[in-house]
Amino acid sequence: MKIRLAALGLIGSVLLAGCGLNVSTSGENSNTANAQQTSFEQALHNLKNSSAETGENGVVQTQLVGDVTPIAEEVTPELPVELSDSDGYDVTVTDVSRILPLDLYGTTSRTIAGLGLRANIVGRTVSSEEPSLEDLPVVTQGGHNINVEAVLALDPSLIIVDHSIGPDEAIDQLRDAGVTTVVINPSRTMASIGDDIRTIAGIVGLDGEGEQLAERAEKERDEAIEAVSEIAPEHAPRAAFVYVRGSSGVFFILGPDSGTAELFESVGAVDAAKEANVSDMVPANAEAFAKLNPDVIVMMSKGLESTGGVDGMLARPGVAETEAAKNQHFITIADSQALSFGPQTGEMILAFATALYNPNSQ
């Protein structure tokens, strides 16, 4: 089987665009489908009947989405797979027994697990926070940098990586070491979740399972958006996504090119950055906060921790003057699911909406 992965350009400093792969349709495994439906139904129940706990200084933590239920418990990849990856390299995949999925978001590991190959994953990045993978060795440093020695020590038979982590020289070193390495460029949008799943499925020789997982993810996404629309208030809250790492200069307000608009609009909120004609990202300074003045500030969980929590945020210029700060309305989302748009997008939407609309004020 020969497939081609198209290369597209880098968006901003951490987010990428790409394309997927069309494959044939086959029937869904009823047992695993029912298990996943139970998980999804529980998320629907939480949205309509439960509340998210409000912590110190008004922070509401979006519930972490757990392990993806595989589309089948036992799968048989059709190998070899011949492909041209998004860096233009011709690759032949002959062995998927020891897979190392590497990206900034954890989407690839969730997709591999959803296809039925969780047991084949031998390592992870810090963003792969699934409970079933927590004991696996982490092969990145500082979140974004690949530790080549740590990767090679795991003797992977296949690396699937994108340029959200790097550096590029590290990926070249892995190729030069003789490790089968496939570089992808996933779109990571609400509309592309199915195609992104199909792309990874094609690499590991599981086209049929990929189609099943893609269809399930798309169906749950649509059902989640519909369910949230039934409870969303008439007056849509204006939200801003703040990306921060530590107390240094990594402090930005993300724009719609980073996927924030799709995230907010899926739960009936307004992206304040998009409304202010911010496209990619801007420095999160006093001027920007005054211009956007969001009703709610959304952050990645580790990002808020790294800057000293809400107290650290309030100490930064302009934050305390926003409506979000005045009303103590801060929401955190696990780094691994904030903008990943993977096979559990529907559950992520429901969890985020629960945190946004059903906080339990203490």
Image (tube, rainbow, N blue to C red):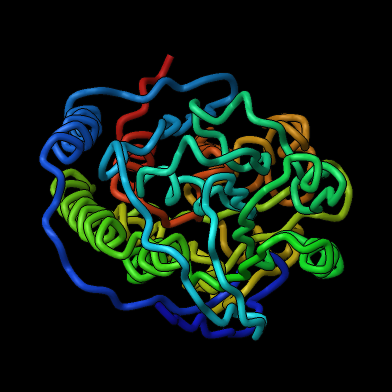
| Rendered-image quadrant of the C terminus | top left
Q: In this view, does 107 lie above or below 181?
A: above
Q: Residue 101: x percent and y percent?
A: 59, 51
| Rendered-image quadrant of the N terminus | bottom left
User: How many numbered markers are drawn?
Assistant: 0
- Between 278 and 348, the residue placed more toward the observer is 348
- Between 3 and 62, the residue placed more toward the observer is 3
Q: Which residue is drawn at 56% across and 82% down?
A: 84
Tell me if 344 is positioned left or right of 14 in this view. Answer: left
Tell me if 35 is positioned left or right of 243 in this view. Answer: left
Q: Residue 330: x percent and y percent?
A: 53, 37
Res. 273 visible in picture: yes
- Between 256 and 32, the residue placed more toward the observer is 32
Tell me if 74 is positioned left or right of 220 in this view. Answer: right
Q: Residue 113: x percent and y percent?
A: 42, 43
Q: In this view, does 187 lie above or below 215?
A: below
Q: Residue 352: x percent and y percent?
A: 38, 41
Q: Residue at x 86, y 55 (%)?
A: 249
Q: Residue at x 40, y 33 (%)?
A: 67
Hey, which quadrant is residue 335 in on the image?
Answer: top right
Tell me if 37 is positioned left or right of 292 in this view. Answer: left
Res. 271 visible in picture: no
Q: Which residue lies furthest to the top in this view?
A: 362
Q: Which residue is drawn at 36% across and 38% down?
A: 68
- Between 219 and 196, the residue placed more toward the observer is 196
